[in-house]
Image (spheres, helix red, strand yellow):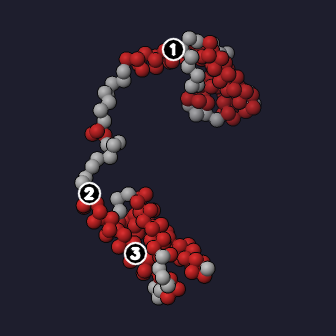
Amino acid sequence: MTAQLDLDALFQRHATDLAGYLRRQLPCPHLAEDLCQEVFLRLGQHPEPGRLVEPRAYLFRIARNLIIDHHRRCRSRPTCQPLDAPELCLACPRACPERETDRALCRRALHAALESLPHRQRQALIWHRIEGITQAEIGRRLGVSERMAGRYITQAIAGCRERLTESPTQHRNF
């Protein structure tokens, strides 16, 4: 049990430095984190961890060996491109006509829903959702309390949802 407590203490004391070392040596930060965990797993498998004179040096030696092993494995594997590489993109750069039509219908329906709102609700919603203005500032601009500005926004969202639900395009992602 004392070896486990020592391993925990070593982890607390050296994991950050070890992970930084691995990140500087490897191209992928996720791989570095995985190898850092592997270092401590291997230390836990040491037959007599209590007899280590310089545990920090031993940790970094394990890390160095894991890096060397990783590079050997990479050299022996054929190189391949990740599936999300831009040069492998087979999609047409232009959107398909159906998607463009759907977007245009959605924009029209949303515009109509906004236009059907009372002026203060519409303005509060536009300021809040599009321009990112706080409710307190909206209240100041409209000459009402922050709470009332919040009500205007809530009512505007409900009005738009209701209007969009009534529309034949059924756009509900508002």
Out of 72 and 115, give the one closest to the viewer.
Answer: 72
Residue 17 higher or lower than 81, as above or below? below
Helix, strand or loop at mark 2: loop
Q: Indicate the secondary structure of the residue bearing disc 1.
A: helix
Q: 15 or 109: which is nearer to us?
A: 15
Mark 3 vs mark 1, CA separation in Å: 62 Å
Percent across and percent down for residue 61 are 38, 77
Q: Is residue 105 above or below residue 79?
A: above
Q: Which mark is residue 108?
A: 1
Hey, what amino acid is under mark 3? Answer: Ile
Amino acid type for the residue under numbered disc 1: Arg
State which quarter of the image contains the N terminus: bottom right
Mark nearer the viewer, 2 or 1 = 2
Give me the residue at 25% from left, 61% from top: 75
Tags 3 and 1 touching, CB below 8 Å: no
Let me know if residue 17 appears in the view.
no
Query: At 34% across and 59% down in the image, what residue appears?
Result: 27
Q: Residue at 58% across / 22% down in the picture?
A: 172
Q: Amino acid at mark 2?
A: Arg
User: Label 3, on which residue?
Assistant: 62
Q: What percent of the width, then of the height, locates residue 19? A: 45, 67
Which percent across, then down, holds residue 170? 57, 16
Neighbour tally class for label 2: few under 14, some 14-19, many 20 plus, Cα within 10 Å? few
